[in-house]
Image: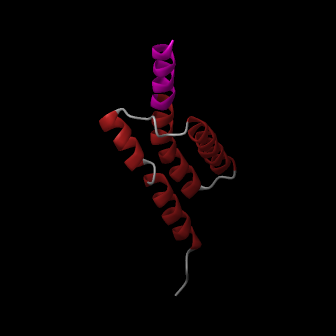
Amino acid sequence: MKFDIVIVGYLAGFFTAIAQFPQAYKVIKTGETSSISLGMYIIMTFGIFFWFLYGVLIPDLPMILANGVCLIPSLYILYITIRNSNISKKQSL
């Protein structure tokens, strides 16, 4: 029986991509982002984007799919976190 290493890539990508969705769901449901580190989400979103780009350039379908899917909730959470941060700054003035 031959082991196909691509399956490991798809599994890793699947679990990494879905890891973002519980946080995104919570943000969608509550709109609350005060406990989310803006700096961490900026860095992580850039990292996901560059892994996606790397997957496109080499080309590696598991990497493209996983990081493409992962970008969706990551960008959403980042957007809401920045928006909430700006609202908090305006309210404190």
- How is colour applied across the structure in the image? secondary structure
Taking depth in this image into account, of 51 and 6 the one nearest to the observer is 51
Q: How many marks?
A: 0
Residue visible at 45% across and 34% down in the picture? 34
Q: Which residues are magenta?
A: 80-93
- Prevailing secondary structure of the magenta residues: helix
- Residue 84 forms part of the magenta stretch: yes
* View extreme (left): residue: 29
Where residue 78 appears, x then y in whole percent?
51, 34
The image quarter in which residue 53 lies: top right
Residue visible at 49% across and 16% down in the picture? 92
* View extreme (bottom): residue: 1
The image quarter in which residue 30 lies: top left
Taking depth in this image into account, of 25 and 6 the one nearest to the observer is 25
- Residue 41 forms part of the magenta stretch: no
Residue visible at 58% across and 72% down in the picture? 5
Residue visible at 51% across and 11% down in the picture? 93
Where residue 42 appears, x then y in whole percent?
60, 36
Where residue 25 appears, x then y in whole percent?
35, 43
**61 shown above or below 48:** below
**46 shown above or below 3:** above
Where residue 47 appears, x then y in whole percent?
64, 45
Taking depth in this image into account, of 37 and 62 the one nearest to the observer is 37
Taking depth in this image into account, of 13 and 24 the one nearest to the observer is 24
* View extreme (top): residue: 93
